Amino acid sequence: MGLLGWLWRAGPSGFGSSSTAEQVTQGIDASQLTAIVTGATNGIGKETARVLALRGAKVIIPSRTLDSGLKVKQSLLEQNPSAELHVMEMDLSSLDSVDSFARSFNSSHKHLNILINNAGIMACPFQLSRDGIELQFATNHLGHFLLTNLLLDKMKATSKKMGVQGRIINVSSNGHRRSDGSCFNLDKINDQSKYKPFVAYAHSKLANILHANELSKHLQEEGSNVTVNSLHPGVIFTNLGSHIQMNPTLMKSLAALAKPILKSIPEGAATTCYLALHPKVKDVTGKYFADCNEAMPSPKARDEMLGKTLWEFSEELLKRRGRPV
């Protein structure tokens, strides 16, 4: 088997790195389901929203501005006029905005079956959020941590009422392996003198996995019919890397070299859509996936004590900002 054949081979799920989001959801009826997809205005988030809507789900698209969200909605409706799409305003880097979105959603929508925490920023210059937290950690982890907590009662109630298992999916990255797990301290996260963009990104992606694992434990202990998993979508060229400072010529050269192992956007959204809809992952929780198959994250991502530390740190950050959870 050649290198490309090895990379593209299907795993135990029957799918692999070359599977697309449409392929892994083929024949699945999601017409009774409601999903929220953060970061659905571009890239793999937009493709995830498109495919969930294609399978019949009602999809809520949070957007930093209503104008940008409505443009995305229109482009998706041009491809699928029957898609049920709703745009709501939310900026994940702002705790006020996340709180406002959750209150509005909870009051205006009866059900929530699927929550896909997909939005993210990568390797941006040092910056603090409106709440005084390093921007990558604030956006990629803490905003999703708060959002999930504020929507959890709705998901639990929906699973009981409909008898359908709820699913929460955190989109992480294999970039989490660069984190040593020593970052869950506000003084360290906010130390501009030691800030390294890719390391900060790694910290936030490690947090995505630890959050999923710890929440999964909590829900299992409660006996809730809601699962939580995390994933690596693959290496895809999207505008996620827009902050990366690199010579354009060098960037093009690297892209050409990496082309054989890069995923397309439909391939990059496949694992997310697989975890959101496929019956094979019913009752699977607290796991990490890549290429639509269970994978092994770093030792730090499997550290239960570190997961508890992150949870307590996240709660403390929210408590200090008047948002106890």
Image: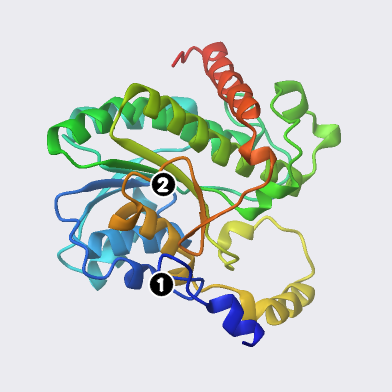
Nearer to us in this view, 164 or 31? 164
Please tell me whether mark 1 sits on a helix, a strand or a loop: loop
Viewed as shown, does residue 231 lie left or right of 277? right
For the point 21% across and 69% down, the residue is 27
Question: Which residue lies most toward the right here?
Answer: 193
Q: Which mark is residue 20?
A: 1
User: Which corner quadrant holds the C terminus?
Assistant: top left
Gap in angstroms between the C-alphas marked 1 and 2: 20 Å
Q: Position of residue 62 (x, y in %)?
A: 36, 44
Q: Residues within 10 Å of mark 2 (few under 14, many from 20)?
A: many
User: Which corner quadrant holds the N terminus?
Assistant: bottom right
Question: Which residue lies most toward the bottom here?
Answer: 2
Q: Position of residue 199 (x, y in %)?
A: 75, 44
Residue corresponding to mark 2: 38
Viewed as shown, does residue 33 lie left or right of 263? left
Which of disc 2 and disc 1 is earlier in sequence? 1
- Amino acid type at circle 2 is Thr
